[in-house]
Amino acid sequence: TSPDGAAYGGKTYRLLVAGRKFDGTTRADGGVEEQVPQSAQTAHLTVWLDVYPTGRTLVWHIAIGEVAAASTVRGATARLANMGYRRGASEEADAETRAALRAYQAAHGLALSGELDGPTIARLSEDHGS
């Protein structure tokens, strides 16, 4: 999601995971979904904001595996990191976590509390797929 809350829908992407390359176009909501090898632990996602292959890009390094429950700070921050709202997971509800939660809440029409409240937990779980 862009800083103004708009999804990166319809953008060309490349996902590198476990020695395999997946090219495609992001969904309208900016999501990417691929079947990756079960043994994969990390992925590298590049999304072209402009013309492929020379345009501006965004890059994410994604941890693959079990994610703590969305109701925990660790689980919420892991989901926020995977969706581009913060860098890495955290065990603390620090200023970066609260800012990431507010940005996510703003992008999804939720109350801007910066807290891990019920509606935010439910939406994180829905958007992240677990």
Image (cartoon, rainbow, N blue to C red):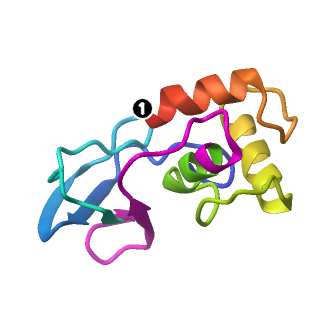
Residue 15 is situated, as x and y percent measured from the top left of the image, at 25, 61
Report which quarter residue 48 is drawn in.
Answer: bottom left
Q: Amino acid at mark 1?
A: Gly
Report which quarter residue 89 is drawn in.
Answer: bottom right
Q: Report the quarter where the C terminus lies.
A: top left
Nearer to us in this view, 46 or 52? 46
When the figure is inspected, residue 57 is found, relative to residue 15, above or below; the finding is below
Q: Would you say 113 lies left or right of 67 here?
A: right
Residue for point 18% across, 57% down = 39
Q: Residues within 10 Å of mark 1 (few under 14, many from 20)?
A: few
Residue for point 56% across, 49% down = 1
When the figure is inspected, residue 81 is found, relative to residue 50, above or below; the finding is above
Residue 21 is situated, as x and y percent measured from the top left of the image, at 14, 64
What span is colored magenta in the figure? 46-75
Residue 37 is situated, as x and y percent measured from the top left of the image, at 14, 53
Q: How many marks?
A: 1
Residue hosting label 1: 129
When the figure is inspected, residue 80 is found, relative to residue 69, above or below; the finding is below
Nearer to us in this view, 75 or 17? 75
Residue 117 is situated, as x and y percent measured from the top left of the image, at 78, 28
